[in-house]
Image (spheres, rainbow, N blue to C red):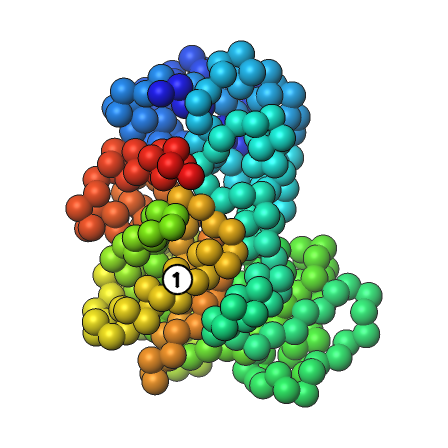
Amino acid sequence: MKIAVVFDTPHPDWDDADYRKEMAEGKVEEAEYDVAQALIQNDHEVRLVGIKDDVRPMVDRLAAFEPALVFNCCESFRGSAQLEYGVAAVLEMHGWRHTGATPTGLLVARNKSMSKKILKHHGIRVPEFATFHPGDPFLRPSTLRFPLIVKPLLEDASIGIAQASVVADDAGLAERVAFIHDKFQQAAIAEELIDGRELYVGVVGNNKLEVLPIVELHFGKLSRAERRIATYKAKWDEEYRDRHHIRSGFARLSEAVRAKIRDVCDAAFHSLWLQDYGRLDLRLTHDHEVYVLEVNPNPFIAYGHELANAAEKAGMNYKALIQRIVDEAGRR
Ligand SMILES: Nc1ncnc2c1ncn2[C@@H]1O[C@H](COP(=O)(O)OP(=O)(O)O)[C@@H](O)[C@H]1O
Ligand SMILES: [Mg+2]
């Protein structure tokens, strides 16, 4: 099959051959190269198409190649993750079938308020929350109970999330909200902090969704004063992770809890217009309630990382996982 891999890149002027050269040199760990390699191993005719701040080169390259499918690995446009949905929209406007979520799915999942409203509408448990837009008067709904966790409304990858994100009173809330407005130039969302186990659930499929082995983040040796949350440091700073013994592993859960998680993930996946694959971030409370913290329509699918490892554990090696996503997109 002719498949184009579309991704955001600092080298928008590069052609397929340039990317392949870099890919062969193996200098960078990029999900799109792993995906392209797996597609080539699956005997597809593959073109790598980068995009940065102009859609025209991508459109021209795709028009010349005429792919049967676009594997969409694009996470941002013009350096903005908020415009991620736009690339999928352009693909759809040209009638190119693509893997992964619809533009609606990408747009809604990124908005931590809109997505929670929709999940709640579908009877899925989410933390109570309030949003604070720059310039609006500061008003905390009295039903919202401390401690709260304050996050940028539209980011991901734990950007803007630190131990200081958890606040215990109105003064702390006002201060952190002002920090988010100032630093990220966007609204803040304050959510009730859900105490419990941190679970990440990779999924593949559409009508019939396959839930991959569930990953748990263990917080290890945080001090008593520290909150057990996946801060930016806890996610990305290897030295910090080692020092605090933060590590992930496959979760040990009872069959009843697994079944509950499967149902929640299935409902959340479909209510937020996801397609083909995704990852759900959950909290499991001590009394076995499942909360959806967020739904990721475009999770990191590099070789050797969380989703790929979960698929591997389910008996689907990387090559098979990427082919499965292609097949799922083809069947829709
Ligand atoms: N309401 C909450 N209750 C408990 N922990 C939370 C809550 N919201 C976020 N967190 C913690 O912060 C992490 C990142 O939050 P998340 O909403 O998934 O944002 P991101 O899109 O940056 O991943 C979560 O994985 C979790 O550890
Ligand atoms: Mg998350």
Residue at the image point whose x is 62% and y is 62% from the top: 114
Q: Which residue, given by chain and number where applicable, does mark 1 sit on?
A: 265
Type of amino acid under label 1 = Cys
Residue 34 appears left or right of 7: left
Image quarter hosting the C terminus: top left
Residue at the image point whose x is 25% and y is 24% from the top: 41
Q: Is residue 52 visible?
A: no
Q: Does the residue tagged 1 have its C-beta within 8 Å of any atom of ligand 2?
A: no
- Counting from the top left corner in percent of width and height, residue 169 is at 63, 85
Residue 133 appears left or right of 261: right
Q: Nearer the viewer, residue 62 or 73?
A: 62
- Counting from the top left corner in percent of width and height, residue 278 is at 41, 50
Residue 216 appears left or right of 279: left
Graded by Cα atoms within 10 Å as few (under 14), some (14 to 19) or many (20 or more), the crowding at tag 1 reads many
Residue at the image point whose x is 33% and y is 35% from the top: 327
Does residue 132 sit above or below 6 in this rendering? below
Image quarter hosting the N terminus: top left
Does residue 119 sit above or below 227 in this rendering? above
Q: Quadrant of residue 150?
A: bottom right
Quick one: SS at disc 1?
helix
Q: How many tags in the picture?
A: 1
Residue at the image point whose x is 68% and y is 87% from the top: 142
Q: Quadrant of residue 329?
A: top left
Q: Can residue 269 be seen in this view?
A: yes
